[in-house]
Image (cartoon, rainbow, N blue to C red):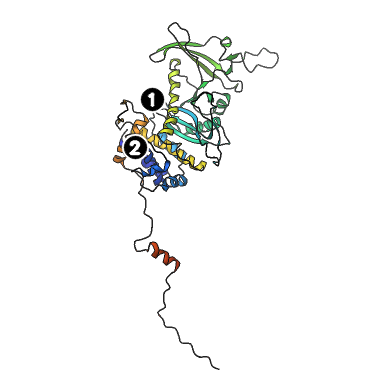
């Protein structure tokens, strides 16, 4: 990564950003160099924001970033030799006090207090991101879109995955949480060129392949039942591997092939169970159930490490809400919320392109990091912007030319326009004859 590559990326974004691109660029730079603010308008006092405070809201109201063009620009920044790993999830932007906001729905939100329902009022956003590293908190969003009231998270994620895979150079591996481990998601993504690794809830019911036709009656569609929470329904695993990890300890990994959901009998998948064991081989915790749907399955011993990369998108959600001030503005329309949300992937990709350039600049109470996180890179972005400047243009001053009257003189000229006198003398009227 070099400063020139980051500068070219910012120039390419500026050319396709559309309306209000100068103010939007200043707003993004202000967010990246501002660690904490109390109100959204406070970003206008940043030294990199060269406009007045109303321009913060006017830029979001007038701007409309092209998400598809920006997604293609993000994909060009990927290294073509690496295996592309995607992660998908959705989160809520709570708007409890916005009673007049259009398409405000009930969304799932985890509450820190026990006994409280995990529900909030607001808008849901679905995200699909690239996970560039095997460990860490980096997630690079390709699409971050609002879930309308006419669709659900499964439909939105399937549409996003299809659009992304059509523009990727190779077949990716996509990682999904337990909400997407269902028959509906498997059927909606069956024609997409992407491998899927999904977590399954422990109360899921699967079926094995049907037995051969006996010649009488209707052929069976499902085989024997396989209940994940009932070990008496399990049959012998097709493959068993034990791994000793420095962090997780002793792990037992089992594989069952060719299982399916009741509603998706034509789409088979492989079932993986990951169980932590103590020194005597007794299970320590509840098992982790994963489902693989794809062409070439990775090594069985690496499945748990591969799925752990999915948690990077959860880190990005927390980073977007806390450091990028995603949920800070109280915008009045869903279109403005979407415009503001489109800037979050842009800012994240700028941090990623700069993470190999900057040095760690911790605060006095922070420990040094050898592997910089997105927050640590953001602390050093002020120096990066000073070196590469900005492709946006400075604001134009209001008003007319210097010779044009201003203030009360201009107001008098508008109310009482000057009437030019004629240079010719009028003819004398002849007296009327009697």
x and y, in percent, of residue 183 in the image: 58, 24
Q: Secondary structure at mark 1?
A: loop
Is 297 drawn above or below residue 27 in the view shown?
above
- x and y, in percent, of residue 112 in the image: 48, 26
Residue at 35% from the left image edge and 38% from the top image edge? 33
Q: Where residue 356 sits in the image (x, y, percent)?
A: 32, 31
- Reading the image, the residue beneath label 2 is 6
When asked about the image quadrant of residue 43, the answer is top left
From this viewpoint, is residue 18 visible?
no
Element under disc 2: helix
Q: Quadrant of residue 103?
A: top right
Q: Is residue 181 left or right of residue 44?
A: right
- Residue, disc 1: 136
Specify which label sits upstream in the sequence, 1 or 2.
Answer: 2
Q: Position of residue 187 (x, y in %)?
A: 57, 26
The quarter of the image holding the N terminus is: top left
Quadrant assignment for the C terminus: bottom right
Does residue 395 sit above or below 38 in this rendering?
below
Q: Nearer the viewer, residue 318 or 193?
A: 318
Is residue 138 toward the left or the right of residue 157 in the image?
left
């Amino acid at each position: 990564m070099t400063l020139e590559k980051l500068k070219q990326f910012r120039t390419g974004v500026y050319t396709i950003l559309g309306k209000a691109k100068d103010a939007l660029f200043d707003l993004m730079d202000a967010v990246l160099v501002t660690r904490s603010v109390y109100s959204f308008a406070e970003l206008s006092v940043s030294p990199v924001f060269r406009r007045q405070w109303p321009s913060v809201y006017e830029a979001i109201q007038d701007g409309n970033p092209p998400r598809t063009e920006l997604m293609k620009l993000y994909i060009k920044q990927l290294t073509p030799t690496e295996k592309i790993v995607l992660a998908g999830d959705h989160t809520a932007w709570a708007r409890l006090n916005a009673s007049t906001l259009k398409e405000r729905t009930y969304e799932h939100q985890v509450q820190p207090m026990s006994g409280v329902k995990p529900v909030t009022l607001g808008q849901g956003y679905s995200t699909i991101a690239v996970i560039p590293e095997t460990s860490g908190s980096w997630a690079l969003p390709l699409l971050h879109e609002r879930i309308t009231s006419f669709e659900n998270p499964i439909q939105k994620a399937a549409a996003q995955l299809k659009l992304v895979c059509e523009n990727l150079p190779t077949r990716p591996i996509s990682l999904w949480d337990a909400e997407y481990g269902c028959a509906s998601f498997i059927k909606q993504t069956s024609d997409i060129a992407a491998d899927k690794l999904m977590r399954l809830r422990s109360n899921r019911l699967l079926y094995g392949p049907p037995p051969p036709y006996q010649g009488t009656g209707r052929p069976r569609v499902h085989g024997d039942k396989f209940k994940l929470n009932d070990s008496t329904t399990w049959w012998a695993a097709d493959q068993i591997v034990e791994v000793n990890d420095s962090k997780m300890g002793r792990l037992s990994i089992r594989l069952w092939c060719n299982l399916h959901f009741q509603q998706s009998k034509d789409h088979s998948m492989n079932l993986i169970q990951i169980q932590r064991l103590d020194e005597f081989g007794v299970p320590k915790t509840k098992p982790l159930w994963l489902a693989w749907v794809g062409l070439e399955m990775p090594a069985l011993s690496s499945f748990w490490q591969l799925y752990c990369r999915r948690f990077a998108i959860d880190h990005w959600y927390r980073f977007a809400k806390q450091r990028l001030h995603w949920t800070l503005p109280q915008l009045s329309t869903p279109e403005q919320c979407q415009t503001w949300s489109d800037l979050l992937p842009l800012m994240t990709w700028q941090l990623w392109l700069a993470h190999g350039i900057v040095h760690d600049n911790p605060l006095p109470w922070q420990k040094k990091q050898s592997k910089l996180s997105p927050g640590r890179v953001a602390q050093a972005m002020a120096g990066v912007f000073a070196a590469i400047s900005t492709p946006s243009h400075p604001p134009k001053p209001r008003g007319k030319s210097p010779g044009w009257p201003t203030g009360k003189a201009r107001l008098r000229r508008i109310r009482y326009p000057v009437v030019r006198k004629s240079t010719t003398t009028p003819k004398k009227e002849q007296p009327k004859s009697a």
